[in-house]
Image (cartoon, rainbow, N blue to C red):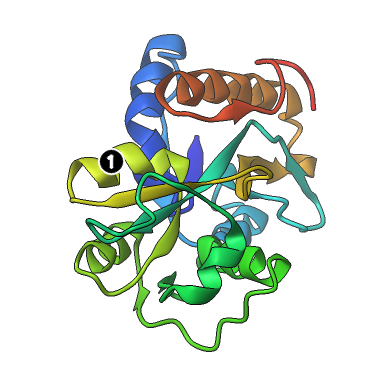
Amino acid sequence: MRLGLIPTVAPYVLPAMLAGLADRLPELTLRVVEDQTARLLTLLREGALDAALIALPSETSGITEIPIYDEDFVLALPPGHPLSGKRVVPGALANLPLLLLDEGHCLRDQTLDVCRKAGVRIEQANTQAASVATAVQCVTGGLGVMLIPQSAVPVEAARSRLGLAHFAAPRPGRRIGPVFRSSSGRDAPYRRLAGIIGELVSRDQEVRLTTKPGTPA
């Protein structure tokens, strides 16, 4: 199976997912492709991928989506920042130097959407990075702050002196799940796979399953 994953998901869920799938589905051989959402969807439509794990909704015709988990965004801060360990609201971003990923990353668009809904106007980000890991190093170095998905926190906080602030309810976040061609005829096995991935990720991360494992969406 050729499975695509976006860069803000792959590094944080693959370890648990690959180990668990090897145990649960030993007959499954995976080929993993990491890329941005638009290119993954193109590969999917062209038949070069069987499925892709992305942020939903994809808003793409001919594509079936299976939501499997929701995760919060967390505010990553330089070490010793006065907001570290506190509850914040999205409006607080108006007074902070915000870092963004490069164009094409869905996390960039999601961050800007959080700002838009909070009435925060972003003229230009201080820094743009190609990966969460690079952006987090910029945050640690005092260049600004950024939103990171909850699944990235254990990895990124373990390898840097990162400060963290969580958002007060309603907390901004995103929904993750696999997508596949509706014409593939593989609805049932892909839903089974989605349920297993949801179980594996929820055990390893602080995420909320959108449905009970194996339940059709």
Extreme residue toward the bottom, this view: 123
Q: Amino acid at mark 1?
A: Val
Instruction: Please give the residue where the numbered disc 1 appears in the rendered image.
Output: 155
Please give left or right for residue 108 compared with residue 27 in the image: right
Mark 1 residue crowding within 10 angstroms, few (<14) / some (14–19) / many (20+) = few
Q: Is residue 131 above or below residue 88?
A: below
Instruction: Report the front residue among 152 and 75.
Output: 75
Please give left or right for residue 100 compared with residue 50 in the image: left
Q: Residue at x 53, y 25 (%)?
A: 197
Q: Is residue 38 visible?
A: no
Q: Is residue 147 visible?
A: yes
Q: Residue 13 occupies which quadrant of the picture?
A: top left
Please give left or right for residue 127 compared with residue 4 in the image: left
**Looking at the figure, which quarter contains the C terminus?**
top right
Q: Is residue 187 above or below residue 177?
A: above
Residue 39 spot, x, y in % from top left: 54, 65
Q: Secondary structure at mark 1?
A: helix
Q: How many marks?
A: 1
Extreme residue toward the front, this view: 82
Q: Residue at x 49, y 62 (%)?
A: 36
Q: Residue at x 40, y 13 (%)?
A: 26
Residue 10 spot, x, y in % from top left: 40, 45
Residue 205 spot, x, y in % from top left: 43, 28
Q: Residue 142 occupies which quadrant of the picture?
A: bottom left
Q: Residue 32 occupies which quadrant of the picture?
A: top left
Residue 40 spot, x, y in % from top left: 55, 57
Q: Is residue 134 above or below residue 72?
A: below
Instruction: Report the front residue among 79 and 108.
Output: 79
